[in-house]
Amino acid sequence: MLTIIECLKWAEKVLTKVSPTPYLDSEIILLHIIKKDKVYLILNGNKMLEVDEEERFKSLINERLDYKPVQYIVNNQEFMGFDFYVDSRVLIPRSDTEILVESVLERIDGIDKGNIAVLDIGAGSGAVAIAIDLFSKNANVFSVDISLEALEVAKLNNKRLNANVKFVFSDVFDNVEGKFDVIVSNPPYIEKSEYETLDKNVKDFEPMLALKAKNGGIFFYERIIEESFDYLKKGGILAFEVGYNQSMKIMKLMAEKGYENISIIQDLSGINRVVLGYRGGKDV
């Protein structure tokens, strides 16, 4: 039997070959098993693990050695301060996507009306839609996805986090009705050549449907922008998360469609991460 610190040191050493954060991965996995917090690890480093705990820990470390993401091993990813259940049916929420949510929330707060109708295209785990619902007092949030498996996870998170998002099966707008004040989307945007170069822990485990897109990665942006005028109120907001090299293309597509006051918002690394604009034209 090993102590807590011995287990962590062993795991850190073996995970070095597959992870840039081997000690952190080890901590997350161990805390998942023993159901404690980091303070407990600090204060009880010399405590022996139970036999079944040690066996379980080594088993999950072996899963990580096969490049399985830590988030799928512990079925959890924090997003906007909330713990979301995740597994291989859905994309793991990224911190970059918090920029998209924050940008939308800032603008929703500036809309002086009662219920704000929000449509999220590409539900995934439900992270974007649920975060908007939980942080905004006046948002009425709908979210769609073409993956029934993803919708199962999103609905699970909706219940776990006591949110009130309506999740609907739809290929973009196919099963959507009504007009919205905000349409937000983090669609698949990785082109084929880039997809082939992704790390194993992404390409081998996260759903391709949520990652890869045709036409150089902009297929879904083109479709959403083209069809959005029929579902967005005049002056309504269209907001996208975009790939590191796509912001100018998306901005141009939106301007050509008739969107106004288009802005680009950078993430914490200074990369253009969000493109956001307002629907012009007549409200028909």
Image: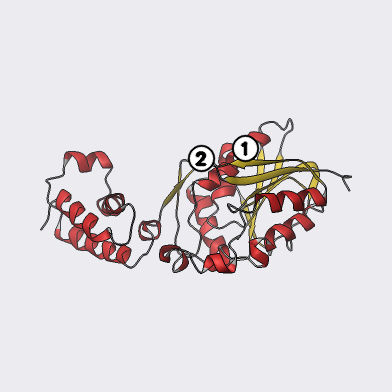
* Residue name at image x 28 percent, y 49 percent: 35
- Residue identified by numbered label 2: 268
In the rendered image, which quarter is residue 225 located in? bottom right
How many C-alpha atoms fall within 10 Å of the one at disc 2: few (<14), some, or many (≥20)? few
User: As rendered, which of 19 and 148 lies closer to the eye?
Assistant: 19
Q: Which secondary structure lies at badge 2? A: loop
Mark 1 or mark 2: whose residue is earlier in sequence: 1
Q: Is residue 99 above or below residue 69?
A: above
User: As rendered, which of 34 and 96 lies closer to the eye?
Assistant: 96
Q: Viewed as shown, does residue 105 lie left or right of 98?
A: right
Q: Which secondary structure lies at badge 1? A: helix
Q: Which amino acid type is marked by label 1?
A: Leu
Q: Quadrant of the N terminus?
A: bottom left
Q: Which amino acid type is marked by label 2?
A: Leu
The location of residue 148, given as percent across then percent down, is 58, 66
User: As rendered, which of 151 and 242 lies closer to the eye?
Assistant: 242
Q: Which mark is residue 105?
A: 1
